[in-house]
Image (cartoon, rainbow, N blue to C red):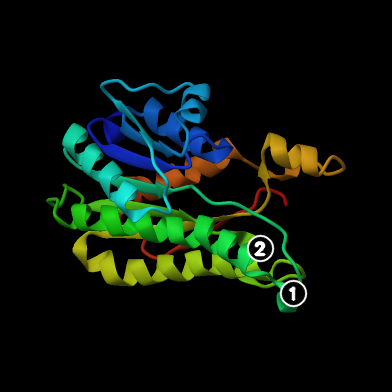
Amino acid sequence: MQAEWTGRTVIVTGASGNLGAGVARSFAAGGANLVLVDRHIEALQRVGFADDARHLLSVTDLLDQVQVSAMVQAAVAKFGGVHVLCNIAGGFRMGEAVHETSDATWNFLFDINARTLLHAARAVVPQMLAQSLDAAGCRGKVINVGAFGAQRGGAQMGAYAASKAGVMRLTESMAAELREQGINVNAVLPTIIDTPQNRADMPGADPVKWVSTEALADVILFLSSRAARSVHGALVPVTGLS
């Protein structure tokens, strides 16, 4: 794993969250250069990261395209390029019935789940396309986070399911557009992730059946690796026992 990531640069959005931090630590253990993106520097520092030779902490509002583009430019200036984009930023919220859904609920979920992905892709993909092919014939990897439960609708989940379905369709579209240009685009579809927040919200559930952040990070690292060079547009269920 060390040889896999040494000298390669990975952007992780939502890097202070449970999954983002787990993904960042897994890449760090493999020797990657990391660009860790969050809205608050204190949040990044709380999970144990600091600016140094291999880490760039970037306070970026992913809903502001100018800020996202500046973050990518800073990453290229420091590390020479970007090889992997992990779009981890996102979130869940139960909503109203579809006919009662407010613009605030709709916009919130599409902003954090789909618009953040779009802004990151706009900034990162052109830079990847400008890079040379590596020994495996790849220019870059993009990994998105969909949701297993968003493969169909559910009561009071219309806006959330639609936003995550948007992530899945964007993943497939990007893969079709970029596969012949040396960029792999794939997504993971987790069920319930074992986080302190989910344990607090569902005290009667059995978290042993949920997906650990470490297990989900393992799948993300695989899709980011040379071993997944022939995988394009996959929506990979990561369900644990749930």
Would you identify the image quadrant in which residue 237 lies? bottom right
Q: Is residue 107 above or below residue 212?
A: below
Q: Position of residue 196 (x, y in %)?
A: 70, 34
* Label 1 vs 2, first from the N-terminus: 1
Q: Which residue is mark 2?
A: 149
Could you tell me which quadrant the N terminus lies in?
top left
Along the line of sight, the residue nearer the viewer: 141 or 198: 198
Secondary structure under badge 2? helix
Mark sitting on residue 232: none
Along the line of sight, the residue nearer the viewer: 159 or 233: 159
**Disc 1 vs disc 2: which is toward the camera?**
1
Secondary structure under badge 1? helix
Q: Position of residue 70 (x, y in %)?
A: 26, 45
The residue drawn where x is 51% and y is 29% is 43
Q: Is residue 83 above or below residue 56?
A: below
Q: Position of residue 154 (x, y in %)?
A: 73, 70
Q: Which residue is mark 1?
A: 100
**Can residue 58 be seen at all in this image of the molecule?**
yes
The residue drawn where x is 62% and y is 63% is 104
Please state if 47 lies on the left or on the right of 121 as rendered. Answer: right
